[in-house]
Amino acid sequence: MMLHLLIGRYATIMLVIWTAGAFYLDDKAKPASRDEKVDYRYWIRYGQERLHFEIRRQQEEARSTGKVAKNVILFIGDGMGLSTITATRIYKNQLAGGYGEENGLSFEHFPYVGLAKTYEVDSQVPDSAGTATAMLSGIKINSNLAGLDARAKYKVCDRSINEKAKVENLITWAQMAGKDTGFVTTTRVTHATLAAVYAHTNSRYWECDSKVPEEYKDCVKDVARQLVEDEPGRNLKVVLGGGLNQLGVPVEQEDYVFCTRDDKQNLVEKWKQGRKNYLFVNTSRDLMEADVSKVEYLMGLFSPGHLPYALERDTSPDGQPSLLNMTVQALKLLSQNPKGYVLLVEGGNIDNAHHEGYARHALHETSEMDDSVAYAAEVTNPDDTLIIVTADHSHTLTIAGYPERGADILGSSNIMEELRGHDILTYANGPGFAGHNNSNCSQDYWREVSEKERQDLRYRPFAGWYAEKETHAGTIPSTHTEVSKSL
């Protein structure tokens, strides 16, 4: 397999690096100094070496037929590490009445699978903004930044450095080639992964103007303004997710508010200006009843912040759409362009659920993304569409003990007496520690948990070390690719 995506010279390099690099983890790369890795040119050279290796490796296996992948769909399960995939495989089949272990998720049937290294220039365990930047541009950066190479520093804006450090990515290259672009997510549309799609910022957290320090407000725009005002954000044909607050739309507030706009700008109204054939929606009904064949630009914001978890969302017509609903409408709109499209689909609430220690929600969010992958594979043609399913990092979720075959993956079954009451799924750290520690020192250190309690949607399995938010993990995620062998 030799993957060609003729969006632009660097787009070709980036996509093949991401896919080919998943198959070949090169531990013999020439050592580079930390200073070298600050410059984006190091990552271009590194990627080119990996690309050339993959081409040489496959020359004897297959010859190019001249076909190219016209369309690209990149699914990112935020925090969807191997343990999450395994647990979801079991969970989804058990919901359908099966044992669970024999099940396979839709993307596990894709013909190509590999592993991908995840780290950042300054961090062994990465964050989502840095990994998304690397996926889309082929350039590793510092943690918690987006769209700026490692010359730029976290929470420090220097205009001259930022101009030099800006990196272009797949979205820009696709737009230059005349393709349509867009993204859908279950998080805020200004959150970390999406910020890497269109923004250049010294902090992924500067989503609203109120989050940008006063001394930097003339140096860098907040992420939401970059989405609406700057390229490539303003050229996106599809933007679907949460984030009414970040874009300044008046709304009844939820219990948790990440940020609101001090400048009182309604950026949705600004987004509408100068456009024809646009549609803004904020309910599931409006999205699913839209005739997207008559729409050129589609924006949907369905929550003040992140979308609710799938198991808790309002499924009425006036509520929030599912990730599958959003994927369906996005593909209908983007597929009208004869030159093709690039669509990013993020299962962002997988990560949010893990951080909260909500294992059931994390597995169900992964299952929801799997449904979207299955739909995309069904309605597209592998001869002209490249589908990649991957993760940006892992979480500390483990599957442990000796549970019987078919045991409820969210339960505590174990054949070892000393593991009685031990959750099958546990976290290395996180808020779940506090819920299992017995405050009465005259009794056992760990309290007993009832099976009824474990069935609560927000039950937190045991965590070995207390942290307000469970952390990312540095283990390698998998990458699954659906593409014709002739590409």
Image (tube, grey):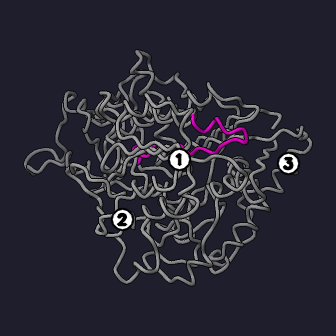
Residue 39, quarter of the rendered image: bottom right
Where's the C terminus, which quadrant? top right
Using residue 64 as the reference point, say whether residue 256 is left or right of it. Answer: left
Check disc 1 and report its element: helix, strand or loop. loop
Front residue of 367/69: it is 69
Say if mark 2 contacts mark 3, CB within 8 Å. Answer: no
Q: Is residue 175 on the magenta stretch? A: no
Check disc 2 and report its element: helix, strand or loop. loop
Image height of 310 relative to 8, above or below: above
Dot in front, 2 or 3: 2
The residue at 53%/72% (across/down) is 122
In primary-sequence order, the first of circles 2 and 3 is 3
Identify the amino acid type marked 2: Cys
In primary-sequence order, the first of circles 2 and 1 is 2
Which x, y percent locates residue 132? 55, 56
Dot in front, 2 or 1: 1
Check disc 3 and report its element: helix, strand or loop. helix
- For label 2, the residue is 208
Identify the amino acid type marked 1: Lys
* Label 3: how many Cα within 10 Å (few below 14, some 14–19, many 20+): few
- For label 1, the residue is 276
What span is colored magenta in the figure?
Answer: 333-351
Using residue 125 as the reference point, say whether residue 151 is left or right of it. Answer: right
The residue at 53%/47% (across/down) is 276
